[in-house]
Image (spheres, rainbow, N blue to C red):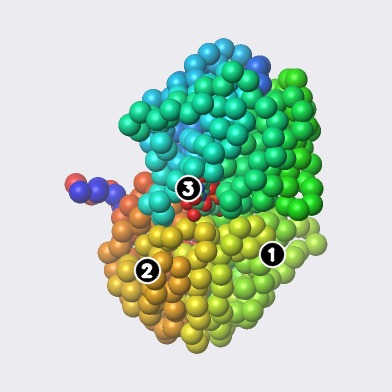
Amino acid sequence: MQHEYILVKKSGPLQGQVTVSGAKNAALPILASLVLTSGVSVLKNVPHLTDIESMVGLLESLGAVITKDYAAGILVVDTTNIHRWKISEEMMQKTRASIVILGPLMARFQKADVAFPGGDMIGARPIDYHLKNFKKMGAEITEQGNVICLHAQKLTAQRFVLDYPSVGATQNILMAAVLIPGTSYIVNAAIEPEVMDLIGILTKMGAQISLEYPAALKIVGVEKLQPVEYSIMTDRLEVGSLLIAAAITGGNVYLPNACADDMELFLMKLEEMGHQIIHEAAGGIRLIASKNPQAVSFKTAPYPGIATDLQPLLMIAQAVSQGKCEAIETVFENRFLHVPYLQLMGAQMQVLGSHKAVVTGVKKLQGAVVVATDIRASCALVLAGLVAEGSTMVYGVSHWRRGYEDLDEKLRSLGAHIEFVKHL
Ligand code: EPZ
């Protein structure tokens, strides 16, 4: 039995301005990348989330010494004494992103013993693209139950061609390749803003990486990387969540540190729905909600397509708009887990197979007791609660805490009725 839930009550139009936190999905691989250096690095704008704590614990288990000032968003990471390349199954199970430690460990020790990672249940989420390319790099891979051991005599620069632009596989291969002598390429690489942020810190460390035609990363191996000071990018997924919150409540919200380039197609969809997106001269994005939003069809895809992580949120926006549309999910095969709960709240949604849902806008949603099954579903259900009659109780709070730093506080500051409730 879960003893905590998020209580959300129907709220008026959200109004005001909030600063968005640093991006979890950039901070996680960036933390892992510090294993490539020996010395003290300083990371700024790090969000305080349980997934980040898990990655910090993982680095500490390898021998890193980390000073944490989460209130200031600063982690000081000393990697001088990292001496282990084995990670416990318990550590690996805490977050899916733990898999991106493979690349840095292979670069530092030419070996890594890890377990298959944990994470959300949004799809099968295999790691075959990662392993296939470590093999190509020269690693011998053995699997014993849930444990994978990678050992290499020598890593060699190659042309790594990905079956699909996987974010994690791109990050892993990239982090291994930066210290391999010679020139490597990652063809069909993911170029998500979070990958570009990782390239940002690696470049600051001294790595030589360039983006080349056709969607390839060119990596010229260097001998050594230096510790650095680096500030994590703004979380585009939190930006998307706040803009949808403003849109569905008929609000007017300004996010001064939001970056429009990170999410152009998503912003275009909001405009097609009738919402006004203003790129303020001082920077950032303002959304002024339409009084009469229209449902629009959309499809998720690797960047620069609409992020799959924004799909559950965009579905909420369609659910309370006028008309009918299709939501096509192309990245994960089990990412409509929020739908049964939204249906319980009165949303008209039909899932057709694993990649398509049809949404027909309704005038009203009704508060209900619902359960979040993954990070983004937790946010979609909370936002649905803002426009549902009465109260909504969202269980599965741990998912929210894995992915959103103080988003409840931020929503409250804009006028939302939302609080955490504990019970026996
Ligand atoms: C990252 O996951 C993000 N996680 C996810 O965000 C995000 O949804 C996803 O990228 C897509 O943008 C982090 O950055 C920590 P992928 P990742 O490898 O790297 C298949 C959130 O809520 N695939 O790009 O695991 C895979 O099954 C999380 O913050 C293989 O088949 O995603 C999926 O269908 C959820 N074999 C597709 O590729 C592989 O070896 C994309 O996955 C690797 C992936």
Check disc 2: other Cα within 10 Å, few if <14, some if 14-19, many if 20+.
many
Question: Of the residues shown, which amino acid type is indicated by label 2?
Answer: Val
Q: Which of labels 1 and 3 is toward the front?
A: 1
Question: Picture coordinates of residue 406 (x, y %)?
Answer: 49, 48
Q: Which mark is residue 264?
A: 1
Check disc 1: other Cα within 10 Å, few if <14, some if 14-19, many if 20+.
some
The answer as to whether callout 2 falls within 8 Å of ligand 1 is no
Task: Kindly indicate whether the residue at mark 3 contacts the one at mark 1 (C-beta within 8 angstroms).
Answer: no
Along the horizontal axis of the image, is 146 left or right of 166?
left
Question: Of the residues shown, which amino acid type is indicated by label 3?
Answer: Gly
Question: Picture coordinates of residue 359 (x, y %)?
Answer: 44, 79
The residue indicated by pointer 2 is 339
Q: Earlier in the sequence, mark 1 or mark 3?
A: 1
Mark 2 and mark 1: Cα distance apart in space: 25 Å
> Residue, x 64% and y 57% (percent of image)?
303
Mark 2 and mark 3: Cα distance apart in space: 20 Å
Q: Which mark is residue 403?
A: 3
The answer as to whether callout 1 falls within 8 Å of ligand 1 is no
Mark 1 and mark 3: Cα distance apart in space: 22 Å
The answer as to whether callout 3 falls within 8 Å of ligand 1 is yes
Along the horizontal axis of the image, is 126 left or right of 211?
left
- Secondary structure, mark 2, is helix
Is residue 11 visible in this depiction of the protein?
no
- Secondary structure, mark 3, is helix
Task: Kindly indicate whether the residue at mark 1 contacts the one at mark 2 (C-beta within 8 angstroms).
Answer: no
Along the horizontal axis of the image, is 145 left or right of 20?
left
